[in-house]
Image (cartoon, rainbow, N blue to C red):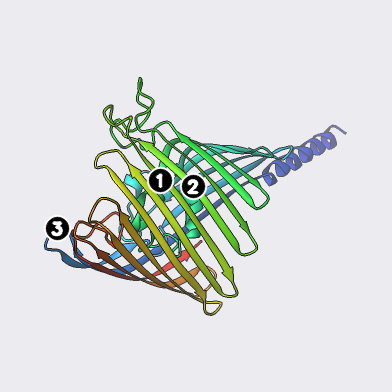
Amino acid sequence: MKITGQIALASVALCACHVAAAQSSVTIYGIADVGIEYVDKLPPAPGGNVSRVISGGQAGSRLGFRGTEDLGGGAKAFLALESGISIDSGELQQGGRMFGRLAYVGLESDLGAVSLGRHRNAIFDVAIPFDPMVYNRYSLFSADPVVGGRVDNAVRYLKSFGPVSVSAQYSFGYDSQIPNGSEVPGDSKIGREMGASIVYATNGLSAMLAYDQRQGVTAVSADQDERRWVAAGTYEWSRWKGYLGLIDLDRSITPALERRTYWAGVGFKATPALSVGGAIYHHDARAQDADSNLYALSVLYALSKRSTLYANVGFSDNDAASTQGVVAPATAIAGQDQRGIVVGLMHRF
């Protein structure tokens, strides 16, 4: 009877462990993206051409871990750790950070989700579906790299109400690698960043509005800021998808800048495997002779659910003082046009 009882107790314990394990999960995922690129007229003056192997021609290469645990009553804990990797060299991206793309932990319930750590900024997540080039090598990210920025020391809130999703975010210091850019004692404004977004999606129509503001990273510039409003919409019909968007930038941090960026584009699903997209991004630099256009074309062919061949083409057309390049954060020589093309392979796992 004693032995039988011990066996029964052990069985109960094993069952309990199995149930607990079933309520938790960790997913390992990633993207390996590598291509060959040609870009002309790269600085310094008079400009040179380059052919090179690059990582992330279509999507940033990464290795990530996502975990969740059911806490009962509709609540759960979650985490994300994501590293950016240069496939061409094997080095870490985002300044060499181990988890430079994402690093946060949080709690979620019927009231919404709250997380703390390193996040994408308030524009990043919501803007990707509204960019015809989906933040590839030549895209909205090239036109304005800050829309693809990340934020250290941040608290984020997310909540969905049917077709509407809202978010709000506050960072005590948006970049820990910038001197005086993170949580400076005695001056809470230095390096502070905040933002919010709202997205509506239903029946082929989607729209978004997002705001992001960050302060300067010195005592002198702490009262100065960089503000972005982003508004965009998409509409899907049959095998087509149309895109329209606007970024309004007002920066009082030196060098001061007022600029609007407009974009429009279209995507077409030619076959289940073949997709084609095109876009134009126009910079209207107010009070400066620095307007520019960035034209982009993308062709993707799915070899399978996980592997995709792609070819992306970019062309920047610059006014006298504009340095808009096809690749971010590299720039063109002021007043000169620039061309780029990348052909590559992307594998998701």
Residue at image coords 59%, 72% = 237
Within 10 Å of disc 2 (Cα), the crowding (few <14, some 14-19, many 20+) is: many
Badge 3 or badge 1: first in the primary sequence = 3
**194 or 311: which is nearer to us?**
194
- In the image, 30: left or right of 283? right
The mark lying in front, picked from 3 and 1, is 1
Residue tagged 2: 210
Could you give the CA–CA distance between mark 1 and mark 2, rounded to whole angstroms?
8 Å
Q: Residue 230: horizontal and vertical position, in percent?
A: 45, 50
Work out which residue is located at the far right of the displayed protein and give it: 1
The image quadrant of residue 296 is bottom left
Task: Name which residue type carries label 1.
Answer: Arg
The mark lying in front, picked from 3 and 2, is 2
Residue tagged 3: 44
Badge 3 or badge 2: first in the primary sequence = 3
Residue at image coords 28%, 27% = 219
